[in-house]
Amino acid sequence: MLPLLKKSSDKPVASLMPAWHPDFRNSTRLPDTKVVRTTFFVNIVAVTIMLVLVLYVIYNEYSLRDILGQIAISQRQIDSDKPGSERAVILFNKFQEEEKKLIELRDFQATKITGSDLLVNLGKSLPAHVVLSLVDYSSARIVLRGNIDGSSDEAIGCASAYAKALGQYPEFASLFDSITVTAINRDESANRINFEISLKFKVAPKILIK
């Protein structure tokens, strides 16, 4: 008898199909099999940021302390130099005062007017009713102070007339740029007018006292 024919396609078909069985695993309870977890990198970044912030704060504190130390040193130096500086300021002020006197003396010696001649000419030009009490000279001007007896209106008119006469006096016409009454007031106790006349030089002259 011929052997029974076998279906040659049954085994290959069965071998191509995977074995099936139900999956009873609970994936939420299974252990994590990752070699490096994601939270590790998150922690590394957080720690790095924290270290940077700590180093920044430490650096700022160190810089602030260094600045405060420099300020303290500078303040001690200022306190140490202050007495000497104050003495130097006092000496400089005294020097300026002495320098001013020397400048006035230099200007006085550099002028070209003979003091006695000036006083003689002032005496010649002085009206009989006018009395001079002061002749004050500086490098820029001469100031005359005096008084005039009489009523206010008459005395004021006499003072103005005297200033005008000085401007027309030959020895003074070319010497002074302007001659003006700069102050005038009534002295009730003496019944007279006190006046002040300013004679401004055209060019600062040289006055020689003889």
Image (cartoon, rainbow, N blue to C red):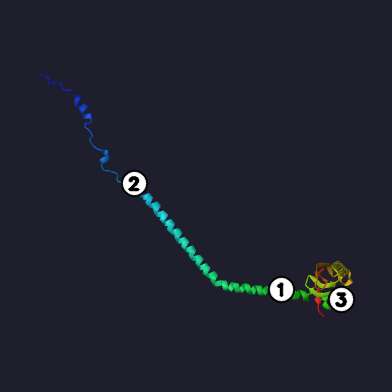
Residue bearing the label numbered 3: 123
* Secondary-structure class at tag 2: helix
Q: Nearer the viewer, residue 151 or 16?
A: 151
Q: Amino acid at mark 1?
A: Lys
Mark 1 or 3, nearer chain start: 1
Neighbourhood count class around disc 3 (C-alpha, 10 Å): few under 14, some 14–19, many 20 upward: few
Q: Which residue is mark 2?
A: 39
Q: Amino acid at mark 3?
A: Gly
Q: Quadrant of the N terminus?
A: top left
Judge by depth and name the residue closer to the eye, 41 or 60.
Answer: 60
Residue 189's mark?
none
First of labels 1, 2 by sequence position: 2
Q: Earlier in the sequence, mark 3 or mark 2?
A: 2
Judged by depth in the image, the label closer to the viewer, 3 or 2, is 3
Task: Specify whether residue 123 is in view.
Answer: yes
57 to the left or right of 196? left
How far across and how far down the image is residue 116, in percent?
Answer: 84, 78
